[in-house]
Amino acid sequence: MLKKQAASHIAPLAGLEEEEVFKLLEVPPQQEMGDIAFPCFVLAKSLKKAPVAIATEIASALQSDILEAVPAGPYVNIRFKREKLATELLKELGQSGFGKLEEGNAARVVIDMSSPNIAKPFGVGHLRSTVIGAALYRLYNEAGYTAVSVNHLGDWGTQFGKQIAAYKRWGNDAALQAEPIRTSLELYVRFHDEAEHDPSLEIEARDWFRKLEQGDEEAKQLWAFFVEVSMKEFDRMYERLNVQFDHTLGESFYNDKMGAVVDELRAKGLLEESDGALVVRLEEENMPPCLIIKKDGTTIYPTRDLATAIYRHDVMKADKMLYVVGGEQKLHFNQVFAVLSRMGHDWSANCEHIPFGLMRFEGRKMSTRRGKVVFLQEVLDEAVSRAMQIIQEKNPNLPNPQEVAEAVGVGAIVFGDLSNNRLNDIDFSLEDAVSFEGETGPYVQYAYARIKSVLAKAREVAEVEKGLEEELTTIDRENNSTKQKVTTSEPTWALLKLLAHYPEYLSKAVQRNEPSVIAKYAIDVAQAFNRFYHAERIADAPLEERAFRLTLTERTAERLAHSLNLLGVKAPERM
Ligand code: ARG
């Protein structure tokens, strides 16, 4: 809203469209410099003048009842007349649908996320994919797209041959039911250990996978059993992380769709033989060839991703496809997109790999092969028990400590992930993440709970003084009422502006596929509120100022809860 106001004033003076001006506007790092700055560099060419001279001219022409402008070098710094705008801004913040954007024009964005592998532990990469993917899903919807989430389970491949072979030799149903992933993993590790001196195991595994591909009943049943028990365990995790999928379609779903892809590749003359395998060469793209059919005639990961992308385009009607998968698969996706483009699917330009960095827990990495893994379940449990400790110290009388500890502990992990730029590697320290101080999830949650208690207290005070409730509800209607005084100290104005700028943060987060923009925003809002809280009386402010401050407080609470929820973090009312 502030940027829009500034843009509409500047556009006619700069001879640019409002939208162009809007994009150029900046928010100065310090409030003393002004509320909005317009850089004049772009005008130098067309006006044949130095940016500094242009800034001076625009600034002197640009005065209105709601703003004043001063030149600062090549910039025009704009300062709004606070008292004039404050109530209007506050009113806008209270409108339903504030912050929703229509940028997406309802375009369908299919988001490939989470996508763990059956019979293997849910790795940290899958955690990041789940958490980042779920945040992007909500952000895109919020920005006016129609997001569709797909869990592309790794439920196919030669490893299932190994899994079945190992199960046939050493399997134990009860153990598998009780602890599916751990038991599957033990089988897998044992398979690899014993296969080192018993080559017959590898042969058995290959046989089982061939049987599986050919639809052998026993093989299919065993496979389905592994999928089922693994899913149960994954679902528990999804529940804790509060993540749902629009579709769960594993790689196996594309088994009967790959033939057509291979035929199409062949018909378009793209398939070439290489050492008995079939590949698509990608020399022009400066990439190694993309393997389509292995020497033994079986299809492979990239083949399945080709069929998947075509399905998402043709059947799911995707306008855009995002693949939230670790950075180590960059080449794979570039190859898949390049092959799609070679096939003449222009829409491959709308496919994007959204990579992210590695995450370690207290320096420990995850590796499925050797069986030395950190289980996500354990990490979450540990975070929750630490949160519980802190809560018991700070607020021993909390009525539902377990529920709050779950929200804080899990929220700390999710927020800790999302507050980093997604490409960064993260060394996760549980102690830091769960701390109520610093740039953490619990810090933001705590700020929210505090605001809620301020509001509760205000209601109590109001009960006594009567009439305030009424004032509170009428402030929006009567925002120019003479009874109400609006004072905008530096911290008040800074908080109000930050809340009003929210749509721009949302837009940036979506453009960059970067939930950290919203995580950082939530921290900024919490900090801005704390400054306001220390500077101003709120619940016990003089009556004529109270309604404005309380409404601002109310709007802050809404924005914080909303931002946390967008990230998939709960906002308990008390903690
Ligand atoms: N299951 C794969 C893995 O864990 C990730 C799948 C990502 N999605 C895709 N369409 N390839 O490595």
Image (tube, helix red, strand yellow):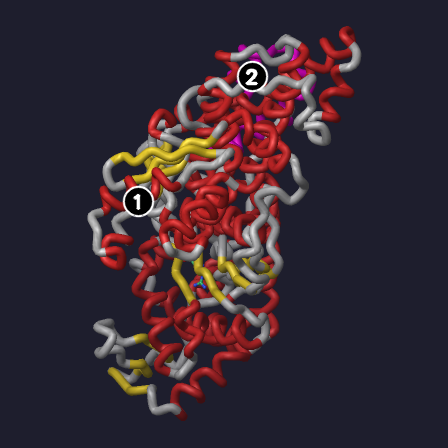
List x then y, in percent, for residue 12: 42, 52
Circle 1 sits on which residue?
Answer: 39
Q: Which residues are magenta?
A: 388-413
Q: Residue at x 51, y 57 (%)?
A: 118
Q: Residue at x 51, y 34 (%)?
A: 65
Magenta: main secondary structure equals helix
Would residue 337 be counted in the magenta stretch?
no
Nearer mark to the viewer, of 1 and 2: 1
- Determine crowd level at label 1: few under 14, some 14-19, many 20+ residues with C-alpha closer than 10 A: many
Q: Secondary structure at mark 2?
A: helix
Q: Residue 192, located in which quarter of the rendered image?
A: bottom left
What residue type is disc 1 on?
A: Pro
Mark 1 vs 2, N-terminal side: 1
List x then y, in percent, for residue 374: 41, 39
Ligand 1 closer than 8 Å to label 2 CB: no
List x then y, in percent, for residue 407: 58, 30
Circle 2 sits on which residue?
Answer: 391
Ligand 1 closer than 8 Å to label 1 CB: no
From where the camera sits, is residue 512 visible?
Answer: no
